[in-house]
């Protein structure tokens, strides 16, 4: 489904003064939420890894996200998988990477 931008552009122009007014407020408030990034990263990693575990792609996992300093984080992901699971996972990754090169080759 293609997005009809002609319909949304007048609405965006109508809200442009509001965005210009709110931008300085967002810039000042954002650093407050930066401290919560490790929590949100851990949450989304846990969701993705839980899906992989439920699907049988991995046996177990452990994640840890630590804020080392402002805007710097250390993410530790440990996966437990069998030999066959690792082969399947690597095959999918290599196939995806090669398909990206193939699609760029045609341009």
Image (cartoon, rainbow, N blue to C red):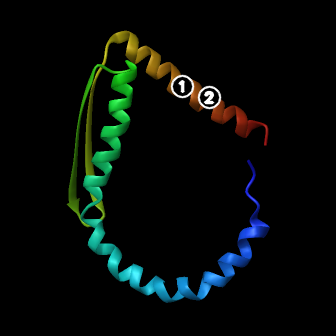
The disc label shown at residue 98, or none: 2
Which is nearer the eye, 104 or 64? Answer: 64
Left or right, residue 20 beside residue 75: right
- Residue at figure coordinates x 51%, y 27% from the top left: 93
Residue drawn at x 47%, y 83% is: 23
Q: Residue at 58% across / 29% down in the picture?
A: 96
Give the residue pinned by disc 1. 94
Q: Quadrant of residue 19?
A: bottom right
Secondary structure type for disc 1: helix
> Percent position (x, y) of residue 56?
37, 18
How far apart in space, not on screen, are marks 1 and 2 (Cα)? 6 Å
Q: Position of residue 74 (x, y in %)?
A: 25, 50
Q: Nearer the viewer, residue 92 or 102?
A: 92
Q: Residue at x 71, y 70 (%)?
A: 8
| Residue in front for this viewpoint, 11 or 30 | 11
Indicate the position of residue 61 as horizontal and vertical percent values. 25, 29
Front-most of 53 and 106? Answer: 53
Q: Which quarter of the figure is the C terminus placed in? A: top right
Left or right: 55 in relation to 70:
right
Determine which of the numbered discs, if any, sits on residue 45 in the image. Answer: none
Which quadrant of the structure image shows residue 98? top right
Answer whether labels 1 and 2 touch (C-beta < 8 Å).
yes
Q: Position of residue 72 (x, y in %)?
A: 28, 59
Q: Residues within 10 Å of mark 1 (few under 14, many from 20)?
A: few
Task: Report the residue that reaches farthest toward the top.
Answer: 84
Tell how many labels: 2
In the image, residue 60 above or below residue 18: above
Bin the neighbour count of mark 2 within 10 Å (Cα to Cα): few under 14, some 14-19, many 20 and up. Answer: few
């Amino acid at each position: 489904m293609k997005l009809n931008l002609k319909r949304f552009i007048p609405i965006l122009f109508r809200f442009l003064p509001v965005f210009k007014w709110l931008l300085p407020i967002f810039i000042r408030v954002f650093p407050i939420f930066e401290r919560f990034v490790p929590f949100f990263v851990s949450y989304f990693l846990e969701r993705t890894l839980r899906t992989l575990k439920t699907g049988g792609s991995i046996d177990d996992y452990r994640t840890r996200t630590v804020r080392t300093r402002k805007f710097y984080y250390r993410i530790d992901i440990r996966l437990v998988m069998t030999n066959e699971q690792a082969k399947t996972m690597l095959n999918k990754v290599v196939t995806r990477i090669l398909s990206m090169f193939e699609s760029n080759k045609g341009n």
